[in-house]
Amino acid sequence: MGRLVILSALLAVAGCAGIPLETVSVPAQSDGWKMGYGNERRGRTILELIPTNESISSWSRMLTIQFLEGMRQPPRAVMTSLEAEMRSRCPNALWNVIAEDATSITYQWSISNCGGQPDQIELARLLKGNDGVHRVAYVRKGTAFDPSERETWLTALSNAYVTKDGKRVVVAPDPS
């Protein structure tokens, strides 16, 4: 399995920032993906990767990497806020926590028949970094994943880790 090169793509999005950003390394197959959208606003970097034969306005699957610079909330609190936002738009959204540890949370959500939005299902992981919180998400249009697709992306998200200056970041859990 090839490693999806997120670090260099995010640095390209960030432009000539003087201070290196933390980012996430995601071990996943990189063939068949391209950058659909990228933006770096102070405090919020985003990169959206889509299949090479699709466009950002017409995609079937997407891998999203976000960096919420300066975010100090624990991953669960960030997830709870994202869930509340989703439920305000789509009250019937299904939401399920898959795994959680001291510095990350992995969850799945899905929406269907939601105010003109396409049906979607997403696997996501929030990771605490030293400089903020990172979100890695794999979403597909439709109401279900193929079981092997779900397993592939759960494994990739579970093995994702925060890096800075090419080195793995060690993050201490919040004191309880």
Image: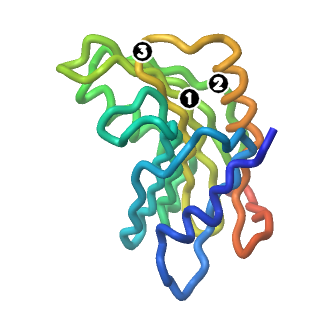
Residue 142, numbered label? 3
Q: What's the amino acid at mark 3?
A: Gly
Residue furthest to the left: 115
Label 3 Cα crowd, 10 Å radius (few <14 / some 14-19 / many 20+) = some
Residue placed at 79% from the left, 63% from the top? 168
**Are circles 2 and 1 on residues that touch, CB within 8 Å?**
yes
Marks 2 and 3 in Cβ contact (< 8 Å)? no
Q: Are there few (<14), some (14-19), or many (20+) residues within 10 Å of tag 1?
A: many
Q: Residue furthest front?
A: 53
Q: First in sequence: mark 3 or mark 1?
A: 1
The residue that mark 1 highlights is 123
Q: Give the x, y percent position of residue 55.
A: 37, 40
User: Could you tell me residue 70's position as x and y percent?
Assistant: 49, 68
Which image quarter is the N terminus in? top right
Residue 24 percent across, percent down from the top left: 65, 56
Rounded to the nearest angstrom, the CA distance separating label 3 from label 1 is: 13 Å
Q: Relative to 50, is 115 above or below?
A: above
Q: Residues within 10 Å of mark 2 (few under 14, many from 20)?
A: few
